[in-house]
Amino acid sequence: MSNVSVDATESAHNDNQPENNTRRRFLTVATSVVGGVGVVGAAVPFIASWNPSAKAKAAGADVEVDISGIEPGQLVRVMWRSKPVWIVRRTPEILEELAAHEDKLKDPNSEAEQQPTFAQNRFRSMKEEYLILVGICTHLGCSPQHLKDGAFEEVVEGVPDGFFCPCHGSKFDMAGRVFQNVPAPLNLVVPPYQFVDDTNIIIGSEAEAV
């Protein structure tokens, strides 16, 4: 009986073998499919993380500014690509000052490439009245202060208006040109920009003057 019992068991085992093999194959395939879905699911957010966020895209976008409300002599600040940009409406008196101290400047003719071609002039601007600069010192990246109405004469004799960096004492005139004998090696950067019309500018791209 024992043998029969054994034979019967073996027979039953042999009879179920195709079914067991089929079940194993099904489980193997199902596990592989689930695993594959998991890998794909994990990869989607990983790949998506390579793409810039909306905030990052916005940070690199052009900035349009309405300059109609800027008073003569006033400086306003805007952010462009996470950098402070100054827009100054210069008075006729400020423009006249620019020719009077060029012998004190490191690069009065803006020969270093710190500005678009259209701004390689005494005024470092597309339109003389409006100065547009990145407000970051070219020494170690501090933000200079705007000193006007004679206050700048405390740091540069005979020059009533300009920019002074309190970190290490660098000085710039009202065209962003750096004075001699200071740590900053270069003039302040003029960003690319264009006039959409007489009262609106776009910072970040260039075009011909309107």
Image (tube, rainbow, N blue to C red):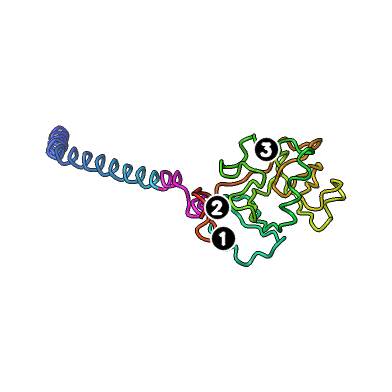
Mark nearer the N terminus (1 vs 2): 1
Camera-side residue: 15 or 189?
189
| Residue 106 lies in the magenta-colored region | no
| Residue 7 point in image, percent of width and height | 13, 34
Q: Quadrant of the N terminus?
A: top left
The amino acid pointed to by label 3 is Asn
Per the rendering, the mark at residue 108 is: none
Q: Label 3: which residue?
A: 109
Per the rendering, the mark at residue 203 is: 2
- Between label 1 and label 3, give the one nearer the viewer: 3
Camera-side residue: 202 or 92?
92
| Residue 186 point in image, percent of width and height | 70, 37
Relative to 144, 43 lies left or right: left
Relative to 157, 195 lies left or right: left
Element at label 1: strand
The amino acid pointed to by label 1 is Val
User: Which residue appears farthest toward the top when viewing the image?
Assistant: 3
Mark nearer the N terminus (3 vs 2): 3
Q: Are marks 1 and 2 in contact (CB under 8 Å)?
A: yes
Element at label 3: loop
| Residue 53 lies in the magenta-colored region | yes
Per the rendering, the mark at residue 65 is: 1
